[in-house]
Image (cartoon, rainbow, N blue to C red):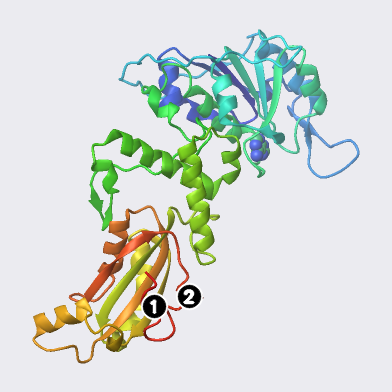
Amino acid sequence: MRLDVITIFPEYLDPLRHALLGKAIEQGRLTVGVHDLRDWAPGVHQSVDDSPYGGGPGMVMKPEVWGPALDDVAAGRSGHELASAEPHRDAARHDELNGVAPQAYPGEDADLPLLIVPTPAGRPFTQSDARAWSAEDHIVFACGRYEGIDQRVIDDAAGRYRVREVSIGDYVLIGGEVAALVIAEAVVRLIPGVLGNRRSHEEDSFSDGLLEGPCYTKPRSWRGLDVPEVLFSGDHARVDRWHRERSLERTWRRRPELLDAAELTAADRDFLAGLAEAAEAEPAGAGDDAAGAVTGRAVHCDLQLLIPPVEWPAIAEAMPGTLAAARVAGAQVWAAETDFTCEPDNMLVTEYAQREGHPPIAEVLHRVTVTGTTELELREVTKAVVAALPKGAYWYGSSYEGGVDPEAGDAGSAACAWQGDD
Ligand code: ADE
């Protein structure tokens, strides 16, 4: 592939020589030409812009400069070629991308080079564009600055290019250079042979229409955070299903609109229905991942706890922070004291009496419920909650999928009311 970039800031494109793109240059899979637009600007001042007809703020880039620049670059008449910044030692591996070919709109000549004009007013650039464009022979980027390029430049270029005006997102950059870098990287990494391991881009976010789930490496435990147990199970089917569910879940929380177009199995649909049900049961705000801060599904932990009541407020106050550090986000904590008369044979009371040699004196049985959002296995959730309790506290309980709202039921009220709930 040949990439040409026309810009008034050629040095901005220097990153093209580094890392993956530099390696592709070195492998001979990519040639990059970066051209200073001012080389085509006549006069002493080499001005490339002028005030807009009809008034308004800013400046518009001139057609008499852009026109000849695009003529020359289409014809391969100009430019400095970039060399890779550093030699890369690893040899290319061969892999293939099937089924992609240069794409032409109806009436377009597929042999023409592709002209990409980055602009916030363009069509959104997507992974599927990246995949299609990775099969192109010649891509030219026209990087505008100021208010944009005179529209006639784009209209006129359609005679010798296939033109695509594209945006990399709903925000405004100062110019098209950074967008060109973004698009170039997304495209070049998909050129066969550039990325060593084909699976790594087959499993990318968006490649199956879903966001990629979390990934982990050694060490198994780091700063008190454990890699999910399932990844050590050696059960490939279970591990694959776990990856699929994390990917579905992340997409559901962060980009639910993508699910409409994704290919989903019956098992996927069941899983998503379970997430939706759990979210309905969840207290408002928990599991809200709109800002990208919270990931995972809703869970809750139910415990019986034998502690002096004076200790509870400090435990409750510290618990959300302790749990957040253990990756249980948005934790909400409730406790209700329960009278021993409700449970004359309570196993915690019995255990206490056996170990301490007398029945509890200051200690009172509490029913504790903790809700939160996490990617941890349920067992790990219980461990995280228990780690937030005083050392040696007598407890008993487990964690469950889904959220609950204890205040909506009886848990916080009369002493014995929660009995029989489970
Ligand atoms: N130029 C300025 N803003 C841009 C954007 N969001 N995408 C592409 N090109 C741009």
Figure quarter occupied by ligand 1: top right
Hey, what amino acid is under mark 1?
Trp
Seen in the picture, residue 177 relative to 340 is either above or below; the reply is: above
- Residue ID at (89%, 42%): 55
How far across and how far down the image is residue 227, in percent? 28, 48
Q: Residue furthest bottom?
A: 361
Residue pictured at 20% horizontal, 92% vertical:
361
Question: CB atoms at circles 2 and 1 under 8 Å apart?
Answer: yes
Image quarter for residue 406?
bottom left
Whole-number angstrom distance, CA of label 2 to CA of label 1: 9 Å
* Residue identifier under label 1: 418
- Binning the other alpha carbons within 10 Å of mark 2 as few (below 14), some (14 to 19) or many (20 upward) gives few
Q: Is residue 312 left or right of residue 7?
A: left
Q: Left or right of 202: which side holds 76?
A: right
**The residue at label 1 has a CB less than 8 Å from ligand 1:** no
User: In front here: 224 or 112?
Assistant: 224
Which mark identifies residue 409?
2
